[in-house]
Image (cartoon, helix red, strand yellow):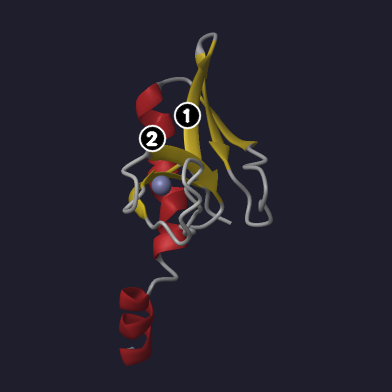
Amino acid sequence: MAWYLNYYSCGKCGYGWDDEWSNCNADECPKCGAQHCNPTRTDDLTFVVKQEGDAFIVYESPVDAVDDPNYVAVANCSNEQSAQEIVQQRSRRYWGSGITDSQTLGAG
Ligand SMILES: [Zn+2]
């Protein structure tokens, strides 16, 4: 499951907060209890790159993560650019299952 950090803004009382989810879920306002607040912005946290010593470690939230990102290290790179390339390559697996690509595949 891809992992997201969602930013919410309550349409009723104006309170803003953020929360991490395995989906772009609607949430409940922690201040006034209004239901079904939709995220105003979403950050994709499926992949994160962390520098550890001289290495850049690529972490990925696995598909079975639901309540927690459960990050696993998927690559160990010597520089940040390589790490970002790994992220790009692996991200395509997610975007590759999107509607646009399946239409392309269906036509072929
Ligand atoms: Zn509210």
Q: Amino acid at mark 1?
A: Val
In this image, 84 relative to 33: left or right? left
Q: Which mark is residue 104?
A: none
User: What element does badge 1 sit on?
Assistant: strand
Dot 2 alpha-carbon crowd within 10 angstroms: few under 14, some 14 to 19, many 20 or more: some
Check the image and report above or below for 102 versus 37. below
If you read the primary sequence from the N terminus, does the residue marked by circle 1 or circle 2 appear first? 1
Front one among 16 and 89:
16
Residue drawn at x 47%, y 48% is 29
Residue 83 pos. (x, y %): 43, 31
Q: Amino acid at mark 2?
A: Gln
Quarter of the image for the C terminus: give it: bottom left
Q: Nearer the viewer, mark 1 or mark 2?
A: 1
In this image, 57 relative to 5: left or right? right
Which quadrant of the structure image shows residue 103? Answer: bottom left
Front one among 70 and 86:
70
Check the image and report above or below for 39 versus 50. below
Q: Which residue is mark 2?
A: 84
In this image, 93 relative to 61: left or right? left
Residue drawn at x 47%, y 59% is 26
Separation of residues labelled 1 and 2 (CA atoms): 8 Å
Q: Which residue is mark 1?
A: 49
Q: Is the residue under label 2 in contact with that under label 1 (CB below 8 Å)? A: yes
Residue sitting at the far top: 53
Residue sitting at the far bottom: 107
Quarter of the image for the N terminus: give it: bottom right
Residue 38 pos. (x, y %): 38, 57
Which quadrant of the structure image shows residue 80? Answer: top left
Which quadrant of the structure image shows residue 53? Answer: top right
